[in-house]
């Protein structure tokens, strides 16, 4: 994946056929480093996106919508002042550099026709969007301003002369002859990989494009120059020439690579380095980029939301674990309580032998079978009776605190177990709907504050998403909850009393239901497959063998006041399985 000069060349070609001579109707800046132009051309309005975000810098047409801030940023206002109502009269890309120039003509406040140049520099964290006055070559402004204090090569600041990014001293591939190509290889280190040699010598090529050329030559991606003879060099030149001719003639093939339900790469070349089954070919490069970056940003958003909720839950688990540890320590200390009571009893029994000022008591321990002698420390500032009371008070204090500790330990363990189940759900949540369900659960259980809603009427709690649905080898439906709300809904709303309920033993995990028609006995194969799913969708997923409890749904109940997903069950049996998705998913509604 790389937005290189070749991709930009394809975008430039597309823009020349869609927005050239188009009128800029509106300009928006929905995000700090993202600008959107609405350009009307030939009865259609096109949305042109400029992003200078480090991880997703790009220019292309888009169909996506963004929410705009209440007040436009100052850079957006400046662009509106100079460019709204103007026409895009020329679009240039110097060589195969990642620089795009839009020449825009517009009438100023005096009614005079003026021209401005909008320059998009697509260079990772150094990306920028700069408005330029071509008459003076001075910068009007840039979306990212910086001085020599930040960049020693150039300044981007209003009124400063525009200086392009530093040249890379690479060859323009569209003008490279075979002799020059071979010469560049000849003067490269023998131990260097071919794709690296191409990357270092030819403008506009990303590592992905260079690797594609090597693949088209019939060579492995890690082939080094020392492994090449005349045959390999000739094949490499032919592959290079083929790619260059396609670029020169504008024969682009918008390509998306999709592996494991995720977009892995995009290109304007048909990427032979990936399996053919992973190739998708949208109609335009902008469509490909739109799909890729929309999916990427969704995944980033999910990742951020998940991370935020995980931090919250882990923080609560840590807090409760410390509290539990403290209560366990109190319980441990309480074991000394009997020693204090014994000391008080012995002081009381021997009070006739003691006087104020004594520091110790030597006495027979009548609680010991052999009445062994014990030594009890005394406070010489206290009377014998006060010393006895001192030990009784310590005894009573420890007894009271140990009683409170016993009362708190079990609820603490239950709460930690519950939060670990939430954490498990979060770690496996793969879309915004499930994250929103878990967020709602955390709000309902008091771990998160409810976001204020502008609506005055009481909002209804939305029904949980549908659980995962599988079909066993025997044709029975197996349902799997993906979070605690789904678990409750599945167990107490969807499942019938005679359906089979499964849950991993002693670990947080999904509730699993085998839908059982009438009184049909469940085949052992289906039971094992459902148990494997229960183990797979649990905290014990990576264990070699996992115990799974199963019972009829009518034997499962929810205690009063229990948190989501927490249940009690009886009359169960246990099966030992290896965690696995041993059956295919019927649907993926949740």
Image (cartoon, rainbow, N blue to C red):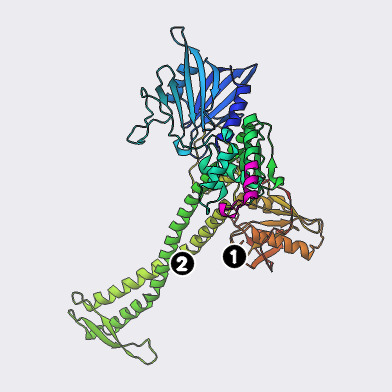
443 w.r.t. 287: above or below: below
The CA distance from mark 1 to mark 2 is 21 Å
Residue 526 as seen in the image, left or right of residue 260: right
Q: Answer whether residue 240 is visible to the viewer in this image.
A: yes
Depth check: give the residue in front, 389 or 35.
35
Residue 380 x, y percent position in the rendering: 19, 77
Residue 459 x, y percent position in the rendering: 58, 36
Disc 1 marks which residue? 506
Residue 212 as seen in the image, left or right of residue 446: right
Magenta highlight on residue 459: no
In the rendered structure, which disc, 1 or 2, sits on the residue that comes first in sequence?
2
Q: Which residues are magenta?
A: 220-238
Task: Quadrant for residue 173, please give it.
Answer: top right
Is disc 2 placed on a helix, strand or loop?
Answer: helix
Query: Which residue sits at x=69%, y=37%?
Result: 281
SS majority, magenta: helix
Query: Which residue sits at x=35%, y=91%?
Result: 371
Disc 2 marks which residue? 406
């Amino acid at each position: 994946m790389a937005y290189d000069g070749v991709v930009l060349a394809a975008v430039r070609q597309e823009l020349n056929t869609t927005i050239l001579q188009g009128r800029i109707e509106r300009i928006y800046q929905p995000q700090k480093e993202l600008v959107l132009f609405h350009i009307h051309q030939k009865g259609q309005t096109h949305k042109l996106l400029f992003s200078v975000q480090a991880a997703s810098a790009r220019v292309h047409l888009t169909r996506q919508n963004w929410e705009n801030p209440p007040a436009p940023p100052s850079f957006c206002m400046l662009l509106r002042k100079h460019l709204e109502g103007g026409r895009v009269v020329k679009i240039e890309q110097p060589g195969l550099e990642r620089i795009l120039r839009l020449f825009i003509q517009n009438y100023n406040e005096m009614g005079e026709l003026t021209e401005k140049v909008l320059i998009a520099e697509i260079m990772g964290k150094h990306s920028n969007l700069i408005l330029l006055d071509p008459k003076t070559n001075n910068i009007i402004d840039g979306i990212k301003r910086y001085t020599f204090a930040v960049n020693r090569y150039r300044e981007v600041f209003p009124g400063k002369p525009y200086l392009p990014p530093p040249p890379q001293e690479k060859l323009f591939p569209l003008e490279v002859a075979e002799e020059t190509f071979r010469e560049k290889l000849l003067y490269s280190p023998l131990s260097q990989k071919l794709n690296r040699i191409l990357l270092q010598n030819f403008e506009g090529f990303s590592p992905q494009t260079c690797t594609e050329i090597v693949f088209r030559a019939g060579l492995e991606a890690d082939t080094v120059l020392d492994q090449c003879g005349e045959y390999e060099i000739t094949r490499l030149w032919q592959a290079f020439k083929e790619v260059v001719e396609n670029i020169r003639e504008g024969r682009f093939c918008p390509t998306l690579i999709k592996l494991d339900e995720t977009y892995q790469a995009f290109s304007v070349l048909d990427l032979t380095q990936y399996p053919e089954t992973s190739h998708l070919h949208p109609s335009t490069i902008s469509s490909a980029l739109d799909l890729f970056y929309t999916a990427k940003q969704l995944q980033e958003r999910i990742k951020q939301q998940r991370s935020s909720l995980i931090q919250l839950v882990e923080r609560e688990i840590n807090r409760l674990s410390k509290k539990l540890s403290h209560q366990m320590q109190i319980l441990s200390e309480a074991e000394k309580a009997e020693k204090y009571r014994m000391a008080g009893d012995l002081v009381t029994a021997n009070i006739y032998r003691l006087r104020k000022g004594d520091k110790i008591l030597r006495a027979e321990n009548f609680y010991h079978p052999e009445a062994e002698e014990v030594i009890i420390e005394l406070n010489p500032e206290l009377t014998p009776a006060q010393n006895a009371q001192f030990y009784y008070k310590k005894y009573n204090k420890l007894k009271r605190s140990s009683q409170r500790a016993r009362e708190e330990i079990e609820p603490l363990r239950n709460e930690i177990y519950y939060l670990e189940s939430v954490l498990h759900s979060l770690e496996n949540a793969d879309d915004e709907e499930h994250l929103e369900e878990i967020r709602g659960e955390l709000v309902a259980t008091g771990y998160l504050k409810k976001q204020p809603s502008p609506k005055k009427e009481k909002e209804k709690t939305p029904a949980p998403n549908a659980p995962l649905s599988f079909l066993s080898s025997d044709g029975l439906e197996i349902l799997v909850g993906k979070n605690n709300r789904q678990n409750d809904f599945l167990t107490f709303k969807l499942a019938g009393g005679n359906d089979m309920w499964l849950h991993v033993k002693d670990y947080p995990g999904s509730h699993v239901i085998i839908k059982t028609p009438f009184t049909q006995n469940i085949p052992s194969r289906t039971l094992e497959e459902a148990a494997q799913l229960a183990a797979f969708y649990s905290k014990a997923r990576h264990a070699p063998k996992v115990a799974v409890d199963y019972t009829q749904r009518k034997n499962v109940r929810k205690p009063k006041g229990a948190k989501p997903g927490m249940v009690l069950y009886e009359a169960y049996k246990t099966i030992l399985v290896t965690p696995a998705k041993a059956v295919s998913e019927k649907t993926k509604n949740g």
